[in-house]
Amino acid sequence: MFAAGDSALGALQAQTRARSRVVEQVWAALPPPLARAVVSAGIDQGCLTIGVAGGTWASRLRYATDALRARVGEALGVDIRSIRIKVVPPRA
């Protein structure tokens, strides 16, 4: 169905790898209980968007935004100008 050289597939794979690196850096920057609540993360145009499993975790994560901006931005070599936190369904 998809050829190995398909540009759409290659772009999707690259996007998936990039998002995996971002979520791994977010997990590393947080204490374990809070890191386990992070379901997804990505950076688009200087905005780090983090998906968490529940409103309580989203509130707690807001207290860590300055540290996240610095640590994740430095680790990935990206200037993070803002952070958006969304409540999303938990990981399966």
Image (cartoon, grey):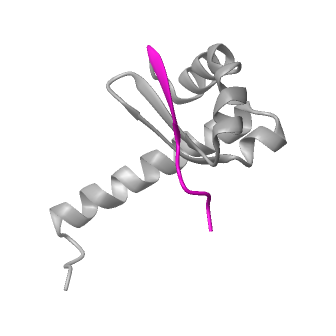
Front residue of 6/90: it is 90
Tell me how many marks there are.
Answer: 0
Residue 77 vs 10, above or below: the answer is above
The one nearer the camera, 1 or 86, is 86
Outermost residue toward the bottom in this view: 1
Q: In which quarter of the image is the C terminus?
A: bottom right
Q: Position of residue 20 (x, y in %)?
A: 52, 50
Question: Which quadrant would residue 59 be assigned to in this image?
Answer: top right
Q: Residue 24 is drawn in which quadrant?
A: top right
Q: Can residue 8 be seen in this view?
A: yes
Query: Image check: 23 left or right of 80?
Result: right
Q: Residue furthest front?
A: 55
- Give the answer, above or below, for where 4 lies relative to 88: below
The percent position of residue 90, horizontal first and vertical second, equals 61, 57
Picture quarter with the N terminus? bottom left
Q: Position of residue 50 (x, y in %)?
A: 53, 37
Magenta segment: does it hold 50?
Answer: no
Residue 89 included in the magenta stretch of the image: yes
Q: Which residue is pictured at 61% across the width and 61% down the height? A: 91
Q: Position of residue 21 (x, y in %)?
A: 54, 45
**Residue at horizontal 71%, vertical 31%?**
29
Work out whether residue 24 or residue 62 is closer to the camera in this orientation and state it.
Answer: 62
Q: Can residue 80 be seen in this view?
A: no
- The residue depicted at 17 percent of the width and 62 percent of the height is 7
Identify the magenta region: 80-92
User: Residue visible at 73% across and 28% down?
Assistant: 60
